[in-house]
Amino acid sequence: MVNNDMTAQNLRSAYAGESMAYQRYKIWGQKAAEEGFENVALLFDAIAYAEEVHAGNHFAAHENAEGGFLVAGGGEFGLGTTSENLVGAIEGEEGEVEQMYPTYSIVAKEQGESDAVRSFHYALEAEQIHAKLYRDAKEHVDNGEDIELEYVSICEVCGHTVVDGLPEKCPVCGEPSSAFRKFTK
């Protein structure tokens, strides 16, 4: 439940941004597949699911708000080559890591909004991983090669992302490995 307007607005904005990231990554994943980067497409698809988890967490933390709201959510636009789309993904993830989530977290902590603090923390932890994965993918794509991976696992509680592995328990939220959804080719 959220009790403060500023945190409520931040949750709505984060919800919008994560929802758009989900859609954008699905589209960019299709483009990667068309260009022959099947593993990059898999990465986009898995991370899209992590963004869906984040959006769901933000929505749940905002549980007591009802009605229609005009919601601003930042997002990268455009459909380019896979390399260009990865630039957009990197910029979006880094913006969340460096600006959005740290600021939103400070406000939520100051306002005593524990559900929002948890939701923002979960997203921030995953977005750091996503930025790194996208940077690595871009390096490979720019060299004309696909990334090497067999599968990607996403924690269905917090969105934590793991490539080619599965922890006994999620290092972010503590859920068991059974809480991870596995994405394969």
Image (tube, helix red, strand yellow):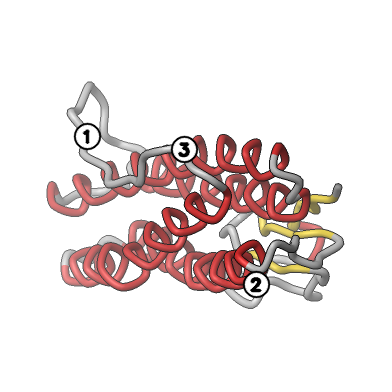
Residue linked to disc 3: 79
In the image, what residue occupies the spot 66% across and 68% down?
143
Residue linked to disc 1: 71
Query: In the rendered view, does 174 fall on the left or right side of 80?
Result: right
Which disc is residue 181 wearing?
none
Whether label 3 touches label 1, CB < 8 Å: no
Above or below, 121 relative to 41: below
Element carrying mark 2: loop
> Mark 1, residues whose alpha carbon is within 10 Å: few (<14), some, or many (≥20)?
some
> Mark 2, residues whose alpha carbon is within 10 Å: few (<14), some, or many (≥20)?
few
Residue linked to disc 2: 174
Query: In the rendered view, does 158 fall on the left or right side of 140?
Result: left
Element carrying mark 1: loop
Q: Position of residue 104 (x, y in %)?
A: 24, 63
> Mark 3, residues whose alpha carbon is within 10 Å: few (<14), some, or many (≥20)?
few
Element carrying mark 3: loop
Above or below, 66 relative to 112: above
